[in-house]
Image (spheres, rainbow, N blue to C red):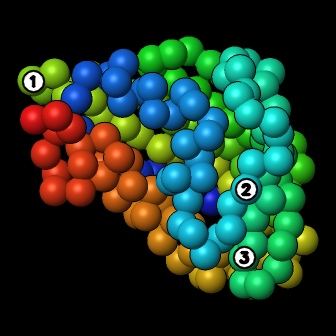
Amino acid sequence: MVDHTLHYTMQLPLPRQEVFSLFSDAANLERLTPPELKFCILTPLPIAMKAGAEIEYRLQLFGVSFRWKTCITVWNPPHLFVDEQLEGPYQTWIHRHSFRDGAAGSTIIEDEVLYRLPAAPMGELAYPLVRAQLERIFKYRQERVRALLLGQDGKEKGG
């Protein structure tokens, strides 16, 4: 079995509490996911985000619909939270979201994902395709975070 990792970092000129608030509302997950994935939260909203919270989704990838269930295993606002797959397409999926102070009141967001593809060793044949898709999803996510928190033109809301 082979573990793979993704690591994305971005910096926003906003205080950590304001940035974290976007991620503390599970309803925003749909806003951060590319529309072609047809992401839908199945768990009734609002979801009380805390350690032990379970969230079930439905997505579509390459025309195939599937369910994904995650659990928040660490919840430490406004610094960190971790979600882990309970049921879904991966053998392992552990996504660590961390938030720290940057220069001049900014916030640094780090996404670290440890994942393992299913059906090893044959599942590894799909690695290049899966990696490219994940990179595209995370780049989209960063663009959406920036747009939602700063506005389309990159300026702070209300400013």
Quadrant showing the C terminus: top left
Amino acid type of the residue tagged 2 in the rendering: Cys
Q: Is residue 131 left or right of residue 39?
A: left
Circle 1 residues within 10 Å: few <14, some 14–19, many ≥20: few
Helix, strand or loop status at disc 2: strand
Residue with the mark numbered 1: 104
Image-quadrant location for residue 109: top left
Residue with the mark numbered 3: 61
Amino acid type of the residue tagged 1 in the rendering: Ala
Please state which of residues 134 and 14 is positioned toward the viewer in this rendering: 14
Please state which of residues 107 and 120 is positioned toward the viewer in this rendering: 107
Which callout, 2 or 1, points to the residue nearer the camera?
Answer: 2
Amino acid type of the residue tagged 3 in the rendering: Leu
The alpha-carbon separation of the residues under discs 3 and 2 comes to 13 Å
Query: Mark 3 touching mark 1, by CB under 8 A?
Result: no
Whichever of labels 2 and 1 marks the residue nearer the N terminus, that label is 2
Helix, strand or loop status at disc 1: helix
Whichever of labels 3 and 2 marks the residue nearer the N terminus, that label is 2
Q: Is residue 47 left or right of residue 95?
A: right
Which callout, 3 or 1, points to the residue nearer the camera?
Answer: 3
Up the image or down, 29 lies above or below 126; here it is above
